[in-house]
Amino acid sequence: KNQVEQSPQSLIILEGKNCTLQCNYTVSPFSNLRWYKQDTGRGPVSLTIMTFSENTKSNGRYTATLDADTKQSSLHITASQLSDSASYICVVSAQTGANNLFFGTGTRLTVIP
Amino acid sequence: GAVVSQHPSRVICKSGTSVKIECRSLDFQATTMFWYRQFPKQSLMLMATSNEGSKATYEQGVEKDKFLINHASLTLSTLTVTSAHPEDSSFYICSARDRGNHSPLHFGNGTRLTVT
């Protein structure tokens, strides 16, 4: 069964600190993995996309990693800011199937001053 | 970049009435759009796939007669919640791809529906 699991469910950190969010998946055959940021009451916005051959990719203070062998991805946020408070959703695409997208339940990050 | 516009952003309606939500792709054509529902502190749940010029494909457990989807053009899909009840109160989000099945999804900003 194709599934995407994220941990932790929620996280509270102090402004300026770093944090790492995890995403484990069983989607097969794997196509790509995307991390989205969703601010409260808004639609998700893409942060990074990882394909099978990519191990790490950065977008400003966000760095995503992918281990296709263990089917794990992480999103590392450096020097957190208050505006990083949001839900972070991991979405995995399969290569085949009419509905080929599988959503994680998200990690709710709260950055406090 | 590609933009998806969703309207309205918030709507309050009385039980028994119908509400229409629009999803537009502003700078690209989308043969397929997706509609999601999101409950508080939960992730997105796919409700249906909207196909331009043909019937929508609904996920298991989603009532097609209650959630009417129309995709009349390559830039517009609408979701109509018919005979709304308080339990239909939720956050509804649409998304679209501007190319093939493996191009990124662009999401609308969602519609907060409250049924009183």
Image: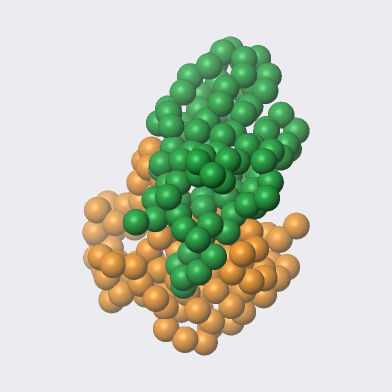
Chain colours: A green, B orange
Q: Is residue A7 above or below residue A38?
A: above
The image position of residue A33, as x and y in percent, is 57, 50
Q: Is residue A17 above or below residue B7?
A: above
Q: Out of B85 and A98, give the one closest to the viewer.
A: A98
Residue reaching furthest front?
A69
Res. B34 in view? no
In this picture, residue A49 sits left or right of residue B9: right
Q: Out of B16 and B74, give the one closest to the viewer.
A: B74
Q: Quadrant of residue A19?
A: top right
Q: Quadrant of residue B20?
A: bottom left
User: How many numbered tags mark residues here?
Assistant: 0
Q: Out of A35 and B45, give the one closest to the viewer.
A: A35
The image position of residue B89, as x and y in percent, is 32, 52
Q: Image point 54% across, 65% down: which residue? A: A95
Res. A20 in view? yes
Q: Image point 64% across, 71% down: which residue? A: B100
The image position of residue B90, as x and y in percent, is 36, 51
Q: Image point 62% across, 19% down: which residue? A: A18
Q: Quadrant of residue A27?
A: bottom left
Q: Give the quarter of the figure containing the N terminus of chain B.
A: bottom right
The image position of residue A5, as x and y in percent, is 41, 41
